[in-house]
Amino acid sequence: MSEIQVASRYAKSIIDLASEQKVLEEVKNDIVVFVETCRANHELQAVLKNPIISLDKKASILDGLFSGKLHKMILSFFQIVIRKGRSEILYATGKEFISQYNILKNVVKATVTSASPLSQDNISQIEEVVKQATKGEVILTAQVDPDLIGGFILKVGDKQFDTSLSGKLSKLKKEFEQN
């Protein structure tokens, strides 16, 4: 079974258990802390994936890092997964948990890339449009790319809306090449 499938099943189990115990929001926040820690610390990911490092050592490292900081359910989950020799999937499980949580709670991630920084009013307007279109909560990330010349590119999930001048120029160039 692939790492993604296993991570997905583990993530679903954590969501189910956290929902049953009515601690889903707390667990989600703790999983975000774990994922961000792993993302920022590549050495931690390397330790978790390294088969040479003993299971006890991996367990004590995670315990030292997160004991008292994360929900006891998450700490117990870490210990179980490590004892089973599957520590390499903890990071993937965390990412998959966040993804499944977002689907469950109808949270949509969107990215807007513009040629120059957008005002807070512009960002709020874009968030509102996405919120109305998706009927969910929106997490919007704003980026700047001067190569766009003007306009913006909005990515919502797997959809992309390109209103940039560079995008329009590219389309025009393709039309000229075809004709």
Image (cartoon, helix red, strand yellow):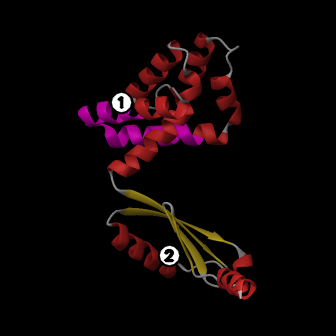
Residue 2 visible in the picture: yes
Question: Which secondary structure type mostly characterizes the magenta part of the structure?
Answer: helix
Q: Tell me if 66 is positioned left or right of 106 in this view.
A: right
Residue 69 visible in the picture: no
Residue 123 shows which numbered tag?
A: 2
The residue positioned 71% from the left and 31% from the top of the image is: 43
First along the sequence among labels 2 and 1:
1
Q: Is residue 100 above or below residue 112?
A: above
**Would you name the residue on which mark 1 appears?**
13
- Residue 89 picture location, percent across and down: 55, 28
The residue positioned 54% from the left and 20% from the top of the image is: 86
User: How far is the residue under mark 2 from the one under mark 1?
Assistant: 36 Å
Q: Is residue 152 above or below residue 53?
A: below
In front here: 163 or 28?
163
In the image, which residues are magenta? 11-36
- Residue 118 picture location, percent across and down: 58, 79
